[in-house]
Amino acid sequence: MRAYLGLWLLFIYLVVKTLALDGEMAELAKMLRENCVEETGADVALIDKVNAGADLMGDAKLKCYIKCVMETAGMMSEGEVDVEAVVAVLPEELQKHADKMRACGTQKGVDDCDTAFLTQSCWQKASKADYILI
C-alpha cells in the first residue's frame, strides 16, 4: 500500500505546473514536504526557488531532501531509481517526457542523496517547463 501511495505522490513531484491538485493530494504533498524538511533540515526557500524556475542547487541538505521525497514516494530504493515505475504512473500530459526520463536512468552519485539529486537534475533539464519540487 505504501508503494502504491508513493507512486501516486510522484504526480505531485513531476506534475505540470498548470495541473491543479485536489485537496487530498495537496495534503499528502504538504505532509511529505514537512516530514522531509524536518528530517533533513533543508531550506524551504531553496525548494521555492526551484519551483520559481531556478535549477536544482547542489546544497547537501537539499540533496538529502530530494532523496527523502523519492524514497518516501517509492521512486527510489537502495540507491536505485525505479524509472519504469515512475513512467508507469505518469499522467497522460507528462508521458511526452517518458523517453527522456528513461534516458536519464539512475544518475549515480557519491551517495544516495547525490544520486537522487543528479537523477532529478537530469529530469529537470529534460523537462524544465513541467518540473516542480514539492
Image (cartoon, helix red, strand yellow):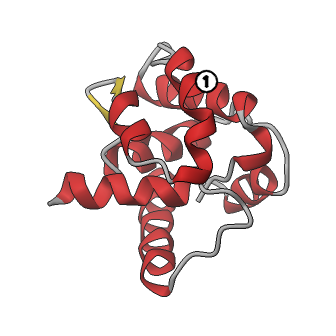
In the foreground, 107 or 102? 102
Total marks in image? 1
Q: Residue at x 76, y 56 (%)?
A: 51
Q: Residue at x 22, y 51 (%)?
A: 3
Residue 52 drawn at (x, y percent): 84, 57
Is 102 on the left-hand or right-hand side of 118?
left
Judged from this view, the residue extending furthest toward the bottom is 23
Looking at the image, is 56 positioned above or below residue 131?
above
Q: Which residue is drawn at 74% across and 66% down?
A: 18
In the foreground, 96 or 48? 96
- Tell me which amino acid carries mark 1: Lys
Instruction: Check the picture and name the quadrant holding the C terminus.
Output: bottom right
Is 78 on the left-hand or right-hand side of 64?
left
Residue 85 drawn at (x, y percent): 33, 37
Task: Rate crowding at label 1 as few (under 14), some (14 to 19) or many (20 or more) other CA atoms within 10 Å.
Answer: some
Looking at the image, is 114 positioned above or below residue 10?
above
Q: Which residue is drawn at 60% across and 46% down?
A: 94
- The answer to which image quadrant residue 103 occupies is top right
- The answer to which image quadrant residue 87 occupies is top left
Judged from this view, the residue extending furthest toward the left is 1
User: For mark 1, what is the residue?
Assistant: 100
SS class, disc 1: helix
In the foreground, 7 or 112? 7
Residue 81 drawn at (x, y percent): 38, 28
Instruction: Check the picture and name the quadrant holding the N terminus.
Output: bottom left
Is 24 on the left-hand or right-hand side of 45?
left
Judged from this view, the residue extending furthest toward the right is 53
Is 15 on the left-hand or right-hand side of 129?
left
